Each structure stands twice: as C-alpha cells, then as structure tokens.
Image: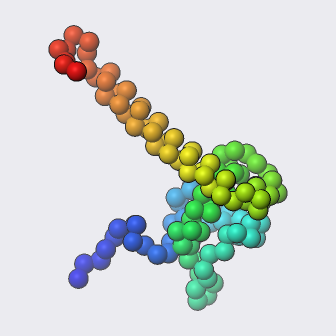
Amino acid sequence: MALNTNKNLKLYYSISEVAKQFNVAESLLRFWEQVFPQLKPHKAGRNIRQYSKDDVEMVKNIYNLVKVRGLKLSAARQVLNKNKEGAMNVSDAITKLKEVREKLVTLRSNLSIISPDDDIEV
C-alpha cells in the first residue's frame, strides 16, 4: 500500500510545516499561542505541537491581522475576540483576491505573447 501524500487528507501539521507555510519562525508561532487564546494546537508526547486545519486557519487570520494589516497584538486579539467570523471572512477574501490577481497577471503575460498582427477570432 502506497503512502498518500495528499496534503488535503492530512489531519495534523507540525510547527515547522506551519512556519514554512507562512514564512515565519517557529518561535513566533509559540509566542502567538501565549498571546492569542484562540490558538491552541494539540500537544502530543513531549509537547510536540500538532496543528489541525482549524489551527492553521487561526494562524492565517493572526498573520493577516498582525503581519499584513499591521495591527498590534492587543488590537488583533480584540478583533478576534469580538468578531472572529468577520476577521476570518476578510482573511478568506484577501486570499481569494491574491489568487485572482495571480491568474490575471498570468493571463496578461500570456496575452502579451500574442502579437496584434495575429489573426485571432473571438
């Protein structure tokens, strides 16, 4: 039986995998666990952190509030306490907009390859 490497089927992620995904240090993730009570990854034997998909989503929201939007930690904590759903929706919208932008940039570069003299029917 072959090992399934599909990331969508993975239940838990290590702290190093999550840190690489967001390009932050592992120590920052451990610090955020102390500052944000919403971020509580499962700890296996020897206190090895295991981040679920919900934990990774929470890291994404914290990253968006602190690193992208530039909020201070106390302000980000208040936003998550008062309006967790709203913060998650904004984070999802930003992610989708970045994906659309990447597709548009690719499309524009593909269109620039085609010269205006080419006979193309629409």
Residue 3 is situated, as x and y percent measured from the top left of the image, at: 29, 77
Residue 8 is situated, as x and y percent measured from the top left of the image, at: 40, 66
**The N terminus appears in which quarter of the rendering?**
bottom left
Q: Residue at x 50, y 45 (%)?
A: 96
Q: Residue at x 67, y 53 (%)?
A: 86
Residue 68 is situated, as x and y percent measured from the top left of the image, at: 66, 46
- Residue 54 lies in quadrant: bottom right
Answer whether residue 120 is visible to the viewer in this image: yes
Residue most toward the right? 74
Up-down: is 109 above or below 100?
above
Up-down: is 61 above or below 41?
above
Residue most toward the top? 117
Q: How many marks?
A: 0
In this picture, residue 113 sits left or right of residue 49: left
Q: Residue at x 25, y 20 (%)?
A: 114
Q: Residue at x 59, y 69 (%)?
A: 55
- Residue 9 lies in quadrant: bottom left
Up-down: is 65 above or below 26?
above
In this picture, residue 120 sits left or right of residue 71: left
In this picture, residue 5 sits left or right of residue 18: left
Answer whether residue 73 is visible to the viewer in this image: no
Residue most toward the bottom? 45
